[in-house]
Each structure stands twice: as structure tokens, then as C-alpha cells.
Image (cartoon, rainbow, N blue to C red):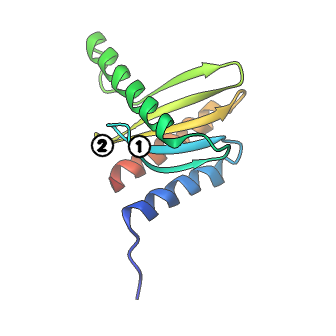
Amino acid sequence: MTATLSKQDRLNATLTNLRTSMPELRGALVATVDGLPIAQAMSDGTDANRVAAMAATALGLGKRINDTLGSGSLTDMSVSGAQGQVYIYAAGNKGVLAVVTPSGMNLGLLHMEARDTAENVANIL
């Protein structure tokens, strides 16, 4: 008999898979578009509530910018700093995936893995 995993377990497994495939990541988090954290795999004790709220706000602003400019549906956006970056991915209409990376990250690999993860999150939600 196979046990059915809860949404929470499936989301945690999805983040674990992302972190396993890219161990250099500093963290990853799934939140609702309202800014509530659902699942997180942060490595440095970062406040998941604050990151979730900021990621959802950034996603909402990015969507408004795209709508205003007629750029189509927002897929992802980034915020860069001297010590690293945060990439924010739309996870369907209900979720947001935030990924924290060190500087010098292989962006092609990151986008490939994170976009797949965001799609999996959207399917779970």
C-alpha cells in the first residue's frame, strides 16, 4: 500500500530536490501570492515570513510592470546584490518560488532547474 503525501510534504520534497540538484543555493522558499510561506529550505536562519512577504510583493509588482508594458505573463525576475541574488519565479496563479543564490551562479542551470521547480509547485498548489 502506497502512502499519499500531503501537499506540504510534496512541496518540501520539491524544494529538497532543487537544493540537492544545486547545493550551492543559499535557500529556496514557496509562498502564496498573498505572502504566506508554505514551504522553505533556507540555510542561514533567514526569516521565512519576511522573505515570503517580500517575494509575493515583488512578484505582484513585476506582474503589474509586465501588464503596463504589454510584456505578457511574468515568468521570473531577479534582485541582485554584491553578495548574491534572489530569483523570483511565478508558480502558477497561486504561488511564488524564491531562490537565493551566491554571486557567480550558473544562471542557465539555475533557470532550468528553478523553472521546472516552479512548474511542479504550480501543479501541487
Quadrant that contains the N terminus: bottom left
Residue under pointer 2: 94
Element assignment for label 1: strand
**Front position in the image: 93 or 8:** 8
Res. 45 image quadrant: top right
Q: Is residue 66 left or right of residue 104?
A: left
Q: Is residue 16 left or right of residue 106?
A: left
- Label 2 to label 1: alpha-carbon separation: 9 Å
Q: Residue at x 32, y 23 (%)?
A: 63
Q: Nearer the viewer, residue 38 or 125?
A: 38
User: In the rendering, at what x and y percent does residue 43 appear?
Assistant: 66, 46
Whether 110 is drawn above or below 19: the answer is above
Q: Is residue 19 left or right of residue 4?
A: right
Residue 85 lies in quadrant: top right
Tell how many labels: 2
Please rate how many residues cluster around mark 1, counting C-alpha atoms within 10 Å: few if below 14, some from 14 to 19, many from 20: many
2 and 1 marks in contact (CB < 8 Å): no
Which residue is label 1 attached to? 31
Give the vertical position of 18 relative to 70 (above or below).
below
Q: Nearer the viewer, mark 2 or mark 1?
A: 1
Give the percent coordinates (x, y) of residue 53.
42, 33
Of mark 2 and mark 1, the one earlier in the sequence is: 1
Q: Secondary structure at mark 2?
A: loop
Q: Image point 58% across, 56% down: which residue?
A: 16
* Depicted 62 relative to depicted 6: above or below: above
Q: Position of residue 59 (x, y in %)?
A: 39, 28
